[in-house]
Amino acid sequence: MGTDLSLLRLLQLVSPGLPIGMYSYSQGLERAVDDGWVSTPDAAREWIGGVLQTSMTRVDVPILLRLLSAWQNQDLAAVTHWSQTLTACRETSELRAEDRQTGQALAKLLVKLDMPEAQAWQRQSEATLATVFSLAAVRWGIDPRLAAMGYVWGWLENQVLCAVKLVPLGQVAGQQLLQALAAQIPAQVDAAMSLDDDDIGGSAFGLALASSRHEMQYSRLFRS
Amino acid sequence: MRLSLKAASFKASTINGDIAFKINGITQLKPEIPEASGIANYATPQPQGWQAQLDLGFEHQHGKTVLAHRRHLGPLTVQRPFYPEGEVCHVYVLHPPGGVVAGDCLAININVASHSKALVTTPAAGKFYRSEGKQARQRVVLSVAAAASLEWLPQETIVYEGAQVASEVRLDLAVGARFLGWEVLALGRPAAQEGFTSGEIGMNWRIFRAGELFYRERLLIDAGAFAANWGLNGHSACGTLFAYPANAAQLAAVQELIGDSAGRGVTLLDDLLICRALDVRADRLRDFFQDVWRLLRPEVIGREACAPRIWAT
């Protein structure tokens, strides 16, 4: 696998143009704004940066790394185990639904991109985005550390776009937020790489509460 | 003050019949000889802190639930069970020292066998005191068999500023088990103008359904997470309530109870209902959870609410 092509494949995988509907999920941010917890650029930075440090670094990335090596070793039992663990760490019904829907949507796409292994995950209730993302990263020869950084970048860009719409922030303020928080990603991924299985897990109480409150929000733009 | 008086009165009734001795000026109970096990593993006060353990086994015998197994090591024990509503066995877990200090390790194991119904609470708030570095640990393992029910309703845990706490709850639910439980944390002592600017609390919940991990929560609360909008947003009380099995109708009922009130949320993961709340006052949060418990108990446990009397005192 050429390094150049694998970089381009990673860009394809993390593009907001990837048709898996990421743009329709705010992960509780919509309710946090509605409740007045996030109302300024600084508060948006605190919220997104905090979720990056707690959930992303302690849940998503370490599990994604394990899924990457499970696919690499063709160990389907491990793929299932870590997908279940990731689902167990999602604290609300909307967060679980988001992961299932985006994971299944990516599986459908990958089947059309000549990855037949994705077939089984199109309707699997324990499909997560990381489950299927890691399959694509392995098949496209993307280095695991870069794949993890790309995964976090995709999440971050989407969260910032949500903040731009919801808080709202100006386009420039959004780019400043992206620039500041992206600078933390390499160190956060490296921290995640050194976590033992027993250390996996990171909940943000405010995020879980906002996401449960989003489920009963009267008027909303986002699905989570 | 009110809470410590309650704890003191229970200490007296528990001491009756047991041999008491003093450690660091605190009266402790000499542990009973373990009945079932042949291991003479007495808890002795260690320089690094108390190692206390309580094992409870509930069984259905002759039409009612009895506390069939009871074993304790160190300063953790139970009062004699009572039956204010007939078939459900109510038990108060007592921790005579009244607070947990650095180096202490408390373990509680509760096993509820098929067809038995148990309600476990505490007579007073738990307390974790300031530490100069060492952790205080608490590990709770709850197992509920098919057609059995457990209500795990401890009063709130007060964590003093500067405390280092590692708390873990593992809940094993068999197919057909029923469970209602909560955990309420009160950080610092707002009345004493305490916030939570130092200290660290690790809170873990793992829920297994028919042997498979179904829910995993791992909160790490330090000064940053206490103040942050994604954490406790400066609220000194936070709580999580679990109900199993639950359905969409019960979810809707709790949502209606919440209405427009701030800082309360509820979700349904398959058949596990999780209600979360933040408040500046732990007593208000506790009252809210008691309301949710009253609302859910008839369908989740199969009985009208019968509040333990100790809650009212």
Image (cartoon, coloured by chain):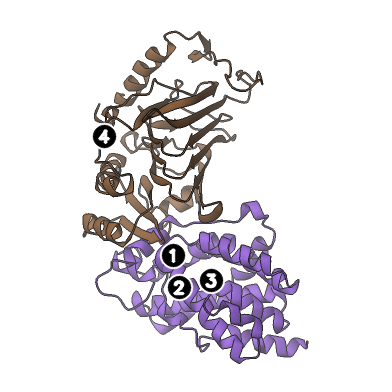
Chain colours: A purple, B brown
Residue at the front extreme, as displayed: B62
Q: Amino acid at mark 4?
A: Ala
- Work out whether disc 4 and disc 2 sit on a shared chain: no
Numbered badge on residue B307 = 4
Question: Which callout, 1 or 2, points at the residue further toward the start of the chain?
Answer: 1
Chain letter of disc 1?
A
Disc 4 versus disc 2: nearer the observer: 4
Badge 4 marks a residue whose secondary structure is loop
Badge 1 marks a residue whose secondary structure is helix
Check disc 3 and report the residue beneath it: A181
Identify whether B8 is placed above or below A197: above
Contact flag, marks 4 and 2 (Cβ < 8 Å) = no
- Work out whether disc 1 and disc 3 sit on a shared chain: yes
Q: Quadrant of the C terminus of chain B?
A: top left
Contact flag, marks 1 and 2 (Cβ < 8 Å) = no
Check disc 1 and report the residue beneath it: A47
x 58%, y 59%: residue: A58
